[in-house]
Image: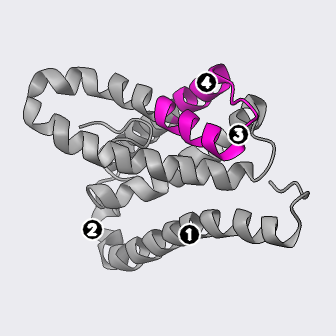
Amino acid sequence: MIVLANTITADMGMIPGLGFLGPAMGLPLSVLAAVVERPFYTLAGVRRNTIWYSLQANLVSLGVGFVGTLVAAPMGDAMYTVWPFLAVAVSIVVERNYLQRRVSPNVVIWEWTILGNMLSAALCVAILYFIVYLRNAYPAWDHRMRPYAPTIQVITFFGCAAAFAYSFLWPKAKATADPSSSVL
């Protein structure tokens, strides 16, 4: 499977020679997608805690993507053709609806949500192809980097998990401290 947005698990990994397979790569791709989509969500109408809500929306989208991948996998080769487009569409709907619940009664504009998700999906695909290129052009990196892979994987996992956990804690703590403040 190919990586698109954050609704499909990574196939190749983001770091040459350190790519770990499957769901673990969903976290850094989701963090990347959240950062890329953040300015679009601001334009879409999310005026407070935008980066935190973007991280939350991407984590929810990632969870839906994992379930969707499990459902789609047994459907065979035909699904692999449709899945990347379906994954981006699902990501758009899930994230926009999640954000809408967070900023209600304000309205989250669909067009900006669509554009942000399409850009983050394109970036994830570009990273995938760049990593494939690097792996083919510099195959020795895998061997040289292998001893460091477990450490980097653990740091990446816990760093991303901390970012997601903080994204849920910060808006609540900030609202309790000062409900009128505008943060990221």
Mark 4 or 2: in front is 4
Kindly identify the amino acid type of the residue bearing the numbered disc 1.
Ala
What is the spatial separation of the Cα atoms under label 1 and label 4, in whole angstroms? 26 Å
| Closer-to-camera residue (68/172) | 172
What is the spatial separation of the Cα atoms under label 3 and label 1, in whole angstroms? 22 Å
Q: In this picture, which residue range is highlighted in magenta?
A: 92-120
| Place of residue 8 in the rendered image (x, y in percent of width and height, measured from the top left) | 33, 42
Q: Is disc 4 surrounded by few (<14), some (14 to 19) or many (20+) residues within 10 Å?
A: some
Query: Pointer 2: what residue?
Result: 143
Q: Residue at x 90, y 58 (%)?
A: 181
Q: Earlier in the sequence, mark 4 or mark 3?
A: 3
Query: Pointer 3: what residue?
Result: 104
- Quarter of the figure that contains the C terminus: bottom right
Kindly identify the amino acid type of the residue bearing the numbered disc 2.
His
Q: Is residue 96 magenta?
A: yes
Query: Pointer 4: what residue?
Result: 115
Q: Is residue 127 above or below residue 14?
A: above
Kindly identify the amino acid type of the residue bearing the numbered disc 4.
Leu
| Place of residue 140 in the rendered image (x, y in percent of width and height, measured from the top left) | 30, 61
